[in-house]
Structures are given as C-alpha cells and as structure tokens.
Image: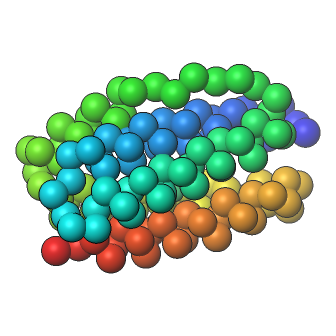
Amino acid sequence: MTKEQKEKLVRAQQGELNAVLIYQRLAKITKHNNGAKVFLEIAADEGKHAAILKSYTNEVLKPEATKAKLVGFLYKLLGHNFVIGLLEKGELKSIDSYQPLKDDFPKIQQIIDDELRHAEMAKSLLK
Ligand SMILES: [Fe+2]
Ligand SMILES: [Fe+2]
C-alpha cells in the first residue's frame, strides 16, 4: 500500500463513518413515509463500508457529527428534495473516488455497488 493509497483509504473511512451519522440524523427528521426505513438501511451499509476500509487501514477513527448537523440544517432550511439531490450526488461522487482503489483493494467493489444502489434509493425518496 502506498502512502497516497493509505491516505485515500483513511479519508474514505472517515467519510463512511460520518455518513452513518448523516443518514441516522436524516432518519430522525424526515417526514417522508419511507424515509426513516431507507435512511437507516443506508446508514447500516455505510457502517459496513467503514469496517471494510478499517480492515485495510487498521486505523480506529471516530465519526464526526459536523456534516450530519449541516445536512440536518439544510434539510430543514432547503427541504427534502434539495437534500435528496445532494445525497445522490454525494453517493455518485464517492464512486469516482473509489474506482482507482478497487484493483488493489478488491473488497471496494462491494462498496461501489452499494453506493450506486444508495443513489437509486435516495432518488426513490424524491417527492
Ligand atoms: Fe458508503
Ligand atoms: Fe452510500
């Protein structure tokens, strides 16, 4: 593992941990009928992704709540559909950052497949 790969994996691991908090927070505040169920399902996947990345980095990281607070704020301020759009973009962007890692770290393909599914799940919540 190169230094650059390690840095990318650690950054991704932190992002996945933060995503758990983001989706858990959204599950709490959403008023969409399916929202809580879908957001909690995604949150559980993001936790699995963090665990996969930890198996490569051996780093123990703590989730940071800053982004979850920001997303919760935006949800209340700019609304459900706005945040769903952000989530979809975020999921697809994360796939772009995982692509260059998947050959050296094969379990990342599972993460990529999940993120694509998450983008679809988020879109399914558009009102
Ligand atoms: Fe993820
Ligand atoms: Fe995701």
Q: Is residue 4 visible?
A: no
**Which residue is located at x 72 percent, y 64 percent?**
110
Q: Is residue 122 above or below residue 77?
A: below
Q: Position of residue 124 (x, y in %)?
A: 33, 76
Q: Position of residue 79 (x, y in %)?
A: 12, 55
Task: Tell me if 4 is positioned left or right of 28 in this view.
Answer: right
The quarter of the picture where the N terminus appears is top right
Residue 85 falls in image quadrant: bottom left
**Which residue is located at x 60 percent, y 66 percent?**
114
Q: Is residue 21 visible?
A: yes
Q: Position of residue 52 (x, y in %)?
A: 75, 46
Q: Position of residue 50 (x, y in %)?
A: 65, 42
**Which residue is located at x 20 percent, y 46 percent?**
29
Task: Tell me if 91 is positioned left or right of 36 in this view.
Answer: right
**Which residue is located at x 82 percent, y 29 percent?**
58
Task: Tell me if 5 is positioned left or right of 1 in this view.
Answer: left
The quarter of the picture where the C terminus appears is bottom left
Q: Nearer the viewer, residue 115 or 47?
A: 47
Furthest-left residue in this view? 77
Q: Nearer the viewer, residue 7 or 48?
A: 48
Task: Tell me if 102 is positioned left or right of 44 in this view.
Answer: right
Q: Is residue 57 above or below residue 124?
A: above
Q: Is residue 111 above or below residue 54?
A: below
